[in-house]
Amino acid sequence: MTSRSMIERGAVTRAGRAVMGGLALFAVAGTSVPAAAQDASEARIRKLESEVRALQRKVFPGGDGRFFEPQISGSASTASTTVPSTTAVTDILARLDAIEAQLQGLTAQVEQNTNAIAKINARLDSGSVGATPAPTPLIGAPTPATTTAGSAAAATPVATPAPAQPTTERLTAVQQIAKPQTDDPADDEYSYGYRLWNAGFYPEAQQQLRLFVDKYPDHWRATYGRNLLGRAYMDDGKPREAAPWFLRNYQTDKNGARAPDSLLYLAETMIAVNDSSRACIALAEFGETYPAVASGRLADQYQANLKKVTCN
């Protein structure tokens, strides 16, 4: 054999060995890829299981074994029976099914808790929890909004017992008071209520004036009607029923013709029920809001009320 042939044969042998070595490495790599993927899947599942257990502890605090297993437990006794072996994929699927079942249970529990909390909040917002039912308001009774002077009187009128049936003599006397008949029916309703009040028929005046203020709230006489309705209650010895009407008239239109009167009468109703602090609030607001009236048209009434209370 010549030297050239020996050299060529050695080169072929080395090339063959290189190819065989590459195939061996490929075979090793081929077997290691599924193992690496399996390890990654195992790590992800363990992480997911750990997160589920943490979520269980958040929803069910206290470490109750009824809801989840403790992370550290005693070694289990060796079973005497032989458990059939399972593949890695079967074990993964079983564990995923268990995780999904746990997540469904937790989701249902969270939804139930959320619904229960929403119902409780709704009851709290409506004031129905631990509160007594509100009395049925009188027909046409006002519900004044809250303002600075709103703290000086009750928010709604106080329900009063039904009045006794009038006597025949009283009915006859009321019928003698004529109702005006002009081209302004709203003004006629107010004027009739005024005539009843002026004659001392306070319950009848209250009924008539409430009819007027409910039917004609935007009439120019409305400020007079609400103020006179408060006075009809006040003159009837019912300051608590009068206060909401005075407050409503003041709040509805502070520039109304009888708004200053109502605010001052509101202070008088508070004096009548021995609520000096709220009376002082109303008097102070009257002096600040209507300084010209306080020193003019209603000066005597204002000073008389100031003398009845001690204000800081």
Image: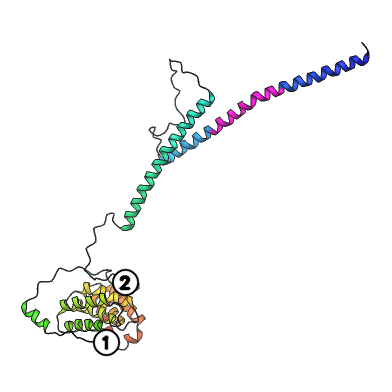
> Mark 2 and mark 1: span between their CA atoms?
24 Å
Quadrant of the drawing holding the N terminus: top right
Quadrant of the drawing holding the C terminus: bottom left
Between 10 and 182, the one lying in front of the other is 182
Rate crowding at label 1 as few (under 14), some (14 to 19) or many (20 or more) other CA atoms within 10 Å.
few
The residue mark sitting in front, 2 or 1, is 2
Residue type, mark 1 in image: Asp
Determine the main secondary structure of the stretch shown in magenta.
Answer: helix
Q: Residue furthest top?
A: 1
| Residue 205 visible in the picture | yes
Residue type, mark 2 in image: Gly
Q: Which mark is residue 150?
A: 2
**Residue 82 location in percent, x, y?**
46, 15
Q: Quadrant of residue 208?
A: bottom left
Left or right of 251, for residue 178: left
Q: Earlier in the sequence, mark 2 or mark 1?
A: 2
Query: Residue at 60% across / 29% down in the picture?
Result: 37
Query: Residue at 34% across / 51% down in the picture?
Result: 119
Rate crowding at label 2 as few (under 14), some (14 to 19) or many (20 or more) other CA atoms within 10 Å.
some
Which residue is labeled 1 in the image? Answer: 300
SS state under label 1? helix
SS state under label 2? helix
Residue 221 drawn above or below residue 138: below
Which residue range is magenta in the image?
25-44
**Residue 113 location in percent, x, y?**
37, 45
**Residue 28 location in percent, x, y?**
68, 22
Magenta-colored stretch includes residue 29:
yes
Between 50 and 267, the one lying in front of the other is 50
Coloring scheme used: rainbow
| Residue 309 visible in the picture | no
Magenta-colored stretch includes residue 238:
no
**Residue 210 location in percent, x, y?**
22, 75
